[in-house]
Image: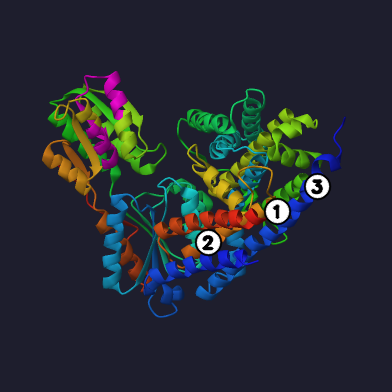
C-alpha cells in the first residue's frame, strides 16, 4: 500500500514548501513572543488593485514601525464567510491586532465580537461596520480608517452636473447591493445630481463591482437608452468595463464616464479621453495608517476613533 | 419478481467495501499526516480551541457534501447547491424578520431547499434532463429567486434563540459540529443499511440493470436530489446563524467545494462508488488545509494552488489505485 503514503508525502511536501516560501517574519512571530508584535491585515480580496495598493502601504508602514505583518484575503470579494474563517484562524494564531476591510458590513460583526473576546484590538479600514449591528452584538472596534464615500459620490455628482451644464441623461452602475461603500457613494451621487432638475437618472443597475459585468450591463443600458450623456460607476473596474462598451458602440468621448478609486488604469483612461474623471481614494495611505494606528495601540498610546483619509476628484 | 437484498447488493458490495476501506485508510492517513505536519510547523494548530474552530468552519461544506455524495454515487451531479443555500437562507431569514418562531422559520428554510432539490429530481427523472443541465438551470433560477426576493439586499439581525444554532453548545460541543455529526451518522446508516442506500449504489453502478431488476429508479433519483436540497437548506441554516445574516449572494462556488470534498473522499464521479465517511475526511482535509495555511500566514494565492493540487492528487491516486483491481 504505497499510495496513501505517496499522497501523504506529496500533500505535506506542498505544505512545507509553501511554508518555506512565505519568508521568515510570520514564522518566527508566534504571536509576538519573539519580540516583534504581529499585525494582521485582512482585506476583501487581493485581485483588486485597490487592495493591492492598501497592502503595499501597510507593508511599508510595518517596516517603519518594526512590526510583523500578515496580509490575507478571500479569493472572492463578496465571500464574507471565508473572510470570517480567515479572521477566526488569525485569532487562533493570536495575532496582536487585526485590521479588517469587511466584505459585509453586518456579516462581519460576529467575528469582531470573537476578536473582542480574545482581547485582540480590531481596526476597521475602508468599509464601515454596521454600527447598529455592532452595538446590538455588544462588539467594539478601536477605530475606523477610511474615506468618506458619501462625499466622494457627491464630488462625482457635482462634476457631472457642471460638465453637462445642468441637463442630460445619466446612468449609474452600482456595486453589490447592501455594501455600505457602494451605498454611500450612490447616496452622495444621487443627492448631488438631484440639485440639477435637468438631469435625469435613466438607469441604475448593479454590475457587482466587476469589470466584465460593467461592460455587459452598460452595453445593455446603452441598447435600451441610446441617448445617454454620462455614466457614474461606483468603482473604476465597472467604469473601465463600461468604457469598452462605449467604444464598441462607437461613442467614445460622447458618453462621460466617471469612476471611483483612481486606479492607475483609470488614470490612464482619463489621459486618453476614454474616461472623464475618477474619485481618488488613497488605499496605500489607508493601509499605512491602519498599521501605524495598530502599532501605536500596541505601544499603549491612544488613537482617534476615526482617521479620515482624504478624497479628491481626478479629471 | 421483487428484488432481494442479495440480488443487487451482495456480490459487488463486498469487493467495493474492501477496496473502499483501503482507499479510506489512505485518505485518513493523508489527513493525519497533514495534522502532524501542521503540529510541527505551528504551535497554534493542535489546540482544543483551534480544532473546534476547524470543525465549525468545515461544517457547512461538509453538510452540503453529504448531499453531493448521494447524488454523485447515483451517477449524477448537483451544481445548484450553492444557490439553494442562498435561496433557503433568505426564505428563512425573511420569516425570522417577521418574528415567526425560529423552529418554524428553520423548517421553512429546509422546506425551500428540499423543494428546489425535488424539482431538480423531477426534471431529471421524468423530464429526462441530464443532471448537469437540470441543476445548472436550478443554479441560476434559485440564485435569481433569492436576489429577486430580497432585492439584492442581505437580511440580518436575528433573535438569540435562532443564533443558538451557531453560538450554542451541548456538552461543550458547538451546535454546528453536532449537526454535522448527526448528518453523517444518519446518512452513513441510510447509505449502508437501508434499501434506499442500496438503490442509490445500484442506480449509479448501472442504471439500466437497476431498472431491469425492478428498482423504482425514478422516484429514488428524485429523492436523492431532494436530499441534496434538504442538506443545502440545513447548510443555509448554519451559515445564516453564523453570519447573523442571510445574503442572496451567499454560497457562490459552494458546489465546487462540496464536489472537491466528495472526490477527495474517494467517491467516483462515474457513480456507483463512494462513502460519506470518505467525504467527511475529504471535507476535513480541505478545512484543515485552509486553517493551517492561514495559521502559517501563507498567501491566499498559494492556498488556492495547494488545494487544487490536493484535489488532483487525490483523484490521481484513486485512478492508479483502482486500475489493477478492475
CB atoms of marks 2 and 3 within 8 Å: no
Given the image, what chain letter belongs to the residue carrying mark 2?
A: B
Image quarter hosting the N terminus of chain A: bottom right
| Residue with the mark numbered 2 | B289
Residue at 59 percent across and 69 percent down: it is B33
Separation of marks 2 and 1 at Cα, in angstroms: 20 Å
Q: Residues within 10 Å of mark 3 (few under 14, many from 20)?
A: few
Question: Residue A140: where, in percent of width, then height?
Answer: 45, 57
Residue drawn at x 48%, y 57% as measured from the top left? B309
Q: For mark 1, give the secondary structure.
A: helix
Between B189 and A172, the one lying in front of the other is B189
Say which quarter of the image contains residue B50. Answer: bottom right
Residue B168 visible, this orientation: no
Q: Is residue A240 magenta?
A: yes
* Residue beneath the point at 54% across and 75% down: B40
Chain letter for mark 3: B
Residue B181 circle label:
1
> How far is the residue under mark 2 from the one under mark 3?
38 Å
Residue B326 magenta-highlighted: no
Where A95 falls versus B109 (above or below)?
A: below
Viewer-side residue, B168 vs A130: B168
Q: Quadrant of residue A161?
A: top left
For mark 3, give the secondary structure. Answer: helix
Secondary element at image label 2: helix
Asked whether disc 2 touches disc 1, contact meaning CB atoms under 8 Å apart, the reply is no
Residue span colored magenta:
A218-244
**Residue B11 disc label:** 3
Q: In x, y percent, where is residue B216?
A: 77, 30
Please state which of the two labelled residues, at mark 2 or mark 3, is closer to the viewer.
3
Please determine whether, in this image, residue A221 is positioned above or below residue B271.
above
Estimate how packed mark 2 is, as few (under 14), some (14 to 19) or many (20 or more) residues with alpha carbons within 10 Å.
many
Picture quarter with the C terminus of chain A:
top left
Amino acid at each position: 500500500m504505497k499510495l496513501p503514503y505517496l499522497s501523504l508525502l506529496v500533500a505535506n511536501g506542498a505544505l512545507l514548501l509553501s511554508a518555506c516560501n512565505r519568508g521568515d517574519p510570520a514564522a518566527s512571530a508566534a504571536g509576538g513572543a519573539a519580540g516583534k508584535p504581529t499585525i494582521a491585515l485582512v482585506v476583501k480580496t487581493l485581485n483588486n488593485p485597490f487592495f493591492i495598493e492598501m497592502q503595499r502601504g501597510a507593508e511599508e508602514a510595518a517596516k517603519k514601525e518594526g512590526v510583523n505583518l500578515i496580509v490575507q484575503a478571500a479569493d472572492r470579494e463578496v465571500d464574507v464567510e471565508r473572510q470570517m474563517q480567515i479572521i477566526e484562524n488569525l485569532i487562533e494564531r493570536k495575532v496582536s491586532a487585526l485590521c479588517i476591510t469587511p466584505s459585509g458590513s453586518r456579516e462581519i460583526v460576529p467575528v469582531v465580537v470573537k476578536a473582542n473576546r480574545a482581547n485582540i484590538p480590531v481596526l476597521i479600514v475602508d468599509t464601515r461596520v454596521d454600527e447598529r449591528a455592532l452595538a446590538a452584538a455588544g462588539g467594539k472596534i478601536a477605530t475606523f480608517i477610511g474615506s468618506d464615500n458619501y462625499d466622494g459620490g457627491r464630488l462625482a455628482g457635482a462634476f457631472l452636473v457642471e460638465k453637462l451644464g445642468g441637463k442630460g441623461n445619466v446612468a449609474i452602475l452600482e456595486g453589490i447591493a447592501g455594501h455600505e461603500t457602494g451605498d454611500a457613494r450612490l447616496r452622495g451621487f444621487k443627492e448631488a445630481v438631484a440639485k440639477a432638475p435637468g438631469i435625469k437618472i435613466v438607469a441604475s443597475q448593479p454590475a457587482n463591482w466587476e469589470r466584465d459585468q460593467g461592460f455587459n450591463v452598460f452595453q445593455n443600458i446603452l441598447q435600451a437608452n441610446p441617448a445617454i450623456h454620462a455614466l457614474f460607476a461606483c468603482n473604476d473596474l465597472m467604469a473601465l468595463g463600461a468604457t469598452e462598451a462605449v467604444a464598441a458602440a462607437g461613442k467614445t468621448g460622447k458618453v462621460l464616464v466617471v469612476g471611483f478609486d483612481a486606479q492607475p488604469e483609470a488614470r490612464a483612461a482619463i489621459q486618453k479621453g476614454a474616461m472623464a474623471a475618477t474619485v481618488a481614494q488613497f488605499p496605500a495611505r489607508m493601509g499605512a495608517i491602519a498599521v501605524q494606528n495598530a502599532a501605536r495601540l500596541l505601544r499603549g498610546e491612544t488613537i482617534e476613533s476615526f482617521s479620515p483619509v482624504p478624497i479628491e476628484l481626478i479629471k | 419478481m421483487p428484488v432481494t437484498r442479495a440480488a443487487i447488493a451482495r456480490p459487488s458490495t463486498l469487493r467495493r467495501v474492501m477496496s473502499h476501506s483501503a482507499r479510506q485508510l489512505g485518505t485518513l492517513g493523508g489527513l493525519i499526516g497533514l495534522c502532524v505536519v501542521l503540529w510541527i510547523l505551528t504551535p497554534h494548530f493542535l489546540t482544543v480551541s483551534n480544532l473546534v474552530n476547524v470543525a465549525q468552519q468545515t461544517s457547512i461544506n461538509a453538510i452540503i457534501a453529504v448531499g453531493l455524495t448521494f447524488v454523485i454515487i447515483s451517477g449524477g451531479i448537483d451544481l445548484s447547491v450553492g444557490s439553494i443555500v442562498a435561496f433557503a437562507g433568505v426564505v428563512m431569514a425573511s420569516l425570522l424578520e417577521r418574528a415567526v418562531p425560529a423552529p418554524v422559520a428553520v423548517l421553512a428554510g429546509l422546506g425551500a431547499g428540499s423543494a428546489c432539490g425535488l424539482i431538480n429530481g423531477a426534471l431529471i427523472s421524468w423530464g429526462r434532463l441530464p443532471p448537469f443541465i437540470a441543476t445548472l438551470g436550478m443554479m441560476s433560477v434559485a440564485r435569481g429567486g433569492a436576489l429577486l426576493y430580497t432585492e439584492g439586499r442581505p437580511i440580518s439581525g436575528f433573535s438569540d434563540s435562532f443564533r443558538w444554532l451557531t453560538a450554542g453548545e451541548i456538552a461543550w460541543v458547538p451546535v454546528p459540529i453536532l449537526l454535522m455529526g448527526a448528518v453523517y451518522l444518519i446518512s452513513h446508516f441510510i447509505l449502508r443499511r437501508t434499501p434506499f442506500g442500496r438503490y442509490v449504489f445500484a442506480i449509479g453502478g448501472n442504471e439500466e440493470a437497476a431498472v431491469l431488476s425492478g428498482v423504482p429508479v425514478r422516484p429514488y433519483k428524485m429523492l436523492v436530489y431532494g436530499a441534496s436540497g434538504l442538506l443545502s437548506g440545513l447548510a443555509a441554516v448554519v451559515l445564516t446563524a453564523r453570519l447573523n445574516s442571510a445574503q442572496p449572494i451567499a454560497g457562490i462556488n459552494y458546489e465546487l467545494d462540496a464536489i472537491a470534498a466528495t472526490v477527495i473522499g474517494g467517491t467516483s464521479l462515474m457513480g456507483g462508488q463512494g462513502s460519506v465517511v470518505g467525504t467527511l475526511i475529504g471535507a476535513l482535509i480541505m478545512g484543515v488545509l485552509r486553517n493551517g495555511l492561514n495559521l502559517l500566514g501563507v498567501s491566499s494565492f498559494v492556498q488556492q494552488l495547494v488545494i487544487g493540487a490536493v484535489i488532483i492528487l487525490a483523484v490521481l491516486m484513486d485512478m492508479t489505485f483502482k486500475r489493477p483491481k478492475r
